[in-house]
Image (cartoon, grey):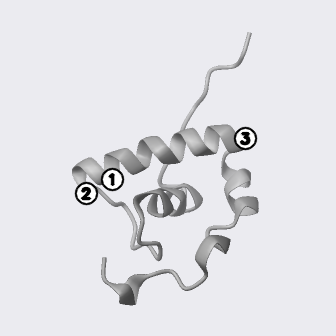
């Protein structure tokens, strides 16, 4: 992406508070965003017009936008 699309808010965007409202655990959030970022890198498949320039940032934006959903098995 070009510099004109870079996120000016830096590490404050997307907000961890907003993200944990979508996925309740930081560990699950990290796992989900890493898996999605890998898909973005491999397939160049982005479902939104993202402010972030990195694949992880784009994945996090997709999570906030509700474009990515995930279900985890309950621990036994």
**Label 1 with label 2: CB-CB less than 8 Å:** yes
Name the residue tied to disc 1.
Answer: 40
Q: For numbered disc 1, what is the local secondary structure?
A: helix
Q: Position of residue 72 (x, y in %)?
A: 61, 27
Q: Position of residue 9 (x, y in %)?
A: 61, 82
Name the residue tied to disc 2.
Answer: 44
For the N terminus, the image quarter is: bottom left
Real-space CA distance between mark 1 and mark 2, rounded to the nearest whole angstrom? 5 Å
Name the residue tied to disc 3.
Answer: 25
For the C terminus, the image quarter is: top right
Find residue 69 and name its label: none
Above or below, 3 relative to 51:
below
Q: Earlier in the sequence, mark 3 or mark 2?
A: 3
Real-space CA distance between mark 3 and mark 2, rounded to the nearest whole angstrom? 27 Å
Q: Quadrant location of residue 2?
A: bottom left
Q: Nearer the viewer, residue 24 or 69?
A: 24
């Amino acid at each position: 992406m070009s510099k004109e699309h870079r996120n000016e808010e830096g590490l404050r965007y997307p907000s961890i508070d907003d993200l944990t409202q979508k996925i309740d655990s930081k560990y699950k959030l990290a796992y989900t965003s890493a898996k999605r970022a890998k898909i973005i890198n491999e397939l160049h498949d982005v479902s939104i017009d993202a402010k972030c320039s990195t694949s992880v940032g784009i994945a996090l934006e997709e999570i906030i936008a509700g474009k990515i959903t995930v279900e985890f098995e309950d621990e036994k």
